[in-house]
Image (cartoon, rainbow, N blue to C red):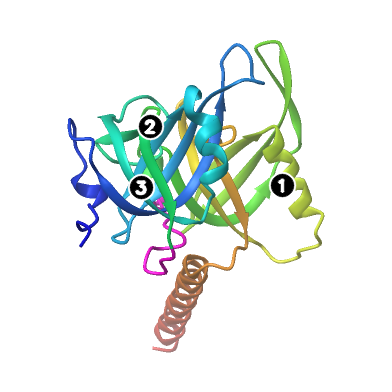
Amino acid sequence: MPPPFDSISKIHPPREAWRLKVRVLRTWIVPSFRNHEVANSMEIVLVDGDSNKIQATVKKQLINRFKESIIEGQTYRMSYFSVVPNQGNYRAAEHEFKLVFLNRTTVIPVPDDDIPKTCFSFCPFDELLKMTEDYVYLVDVIGLLTSVGEEKEYVKDAKVMKMIVLELSSKELTIRCALFGEYVDEVHRFLGSGYMEQPVVVIQLAKVKFFRGQVGLQNVMHATRLFFNPDLCEVVDFKNRLLDAILLNNMFSWFIFLVTVLTWLI
């Protein structure tokens, strides 16, 4: 009988013989700094049946071996990794360690409906707005789209990129998110779809930036994902909370009105 699967929460160095059953939440290619046509690494976010998440890296020497066999949304049995400290300014999971694929790493597809198909870690706006420096972990956010700025051009490293700023709101708090390049096209495609109501936007794996005394978000190229009115239970819960807040506010306003009227009559 095979040994039980390990929990992501228990992963630590120096052991390499970890045996995981996980779903691939996100995967993307990080290009080389000097040549964006050449891949430097393949990054993966994994989640297990207890909703524990960890980031994994496939170094460029092994990308061709694993690229076609690791598909977003699929569930796998994976074994044997190097375990290293989770460092850097673009950490996609709040785990102390991350995995690095080895030559001996095995990846076998398995059916499993017990592992969450989505696993967002939404950061509340009030926590984001209290930050006073760039945050090393990438965050997920959910909010009502209240404003879309004009498209502008942004020059970096002698390259011109499209840029647009979204304003999201939640519980009377607002935060801005700057989007660049291909993400601008995604916004335009949604706006051109003819949707009339204020949409709920989910941003997965955004970077928190502290700039000129203000906290904002921006996309991380290739890693960030945008969802406009996705069919998710988290969106239903968010809309219900908004509705409850509106009803509560209306009830409070009506109560103040009644008190004012009664005071005037007395």
Of residue 259 and residue 150, the one placed in the foreground of this image is 150
- Mark closest to the chain's N terminus, 1 or 2: 2
Residue 8 position (above or below residue 165) = below
Q: Amino acid at mark 3?
A: Met
Q: Amino acid at mark 2?
A: Tyr
Q: Give the quadrant of the N terminus.
A: bottom left
Give the residue drawn at x 63%, y 36%.
179
Q: Position of residue 12 (x, y in %)?
A: 19, 37
Distance Cα–Cα, label 1 vs label 2? 25 Å
- Mark closest to the chain's N terminus, 2 or 3: 3
Residue 140 position (above or below residue 38) = below
Q: Is residue 250 visible?
A: yes
Determine which residue is flagged by label 1: 187
Q: Is residue 152 left or right of residue 231?
A: right
Q: How many discs appear?
A: 3
Distance Cα–Cα, label 3 vs label 1? 36 Å
Characterize the local packing of mark 1: few (<14), some (14-19) or many (20 or more) Cα atoms within 10 angstroms.
some
Residue 235: image tag:
none
- Mark closest to the chain's N terminus, 3 or 1: 3
Residue 135: image tag:
2
Q: Is residue 119 magenta?
A: yes
Secondary structure under tag 2 reads loop
Displayed quadrant of residue 92: top left
The magenta span reads 111-126
Residue 78: image tag:
3
Q: Is residue 8 left or right of residue 129?
A: left
Of residue 256 and residue 233, the one placed in the foreground of this image is 233
Disc number lying in front (3 or 1) = 3
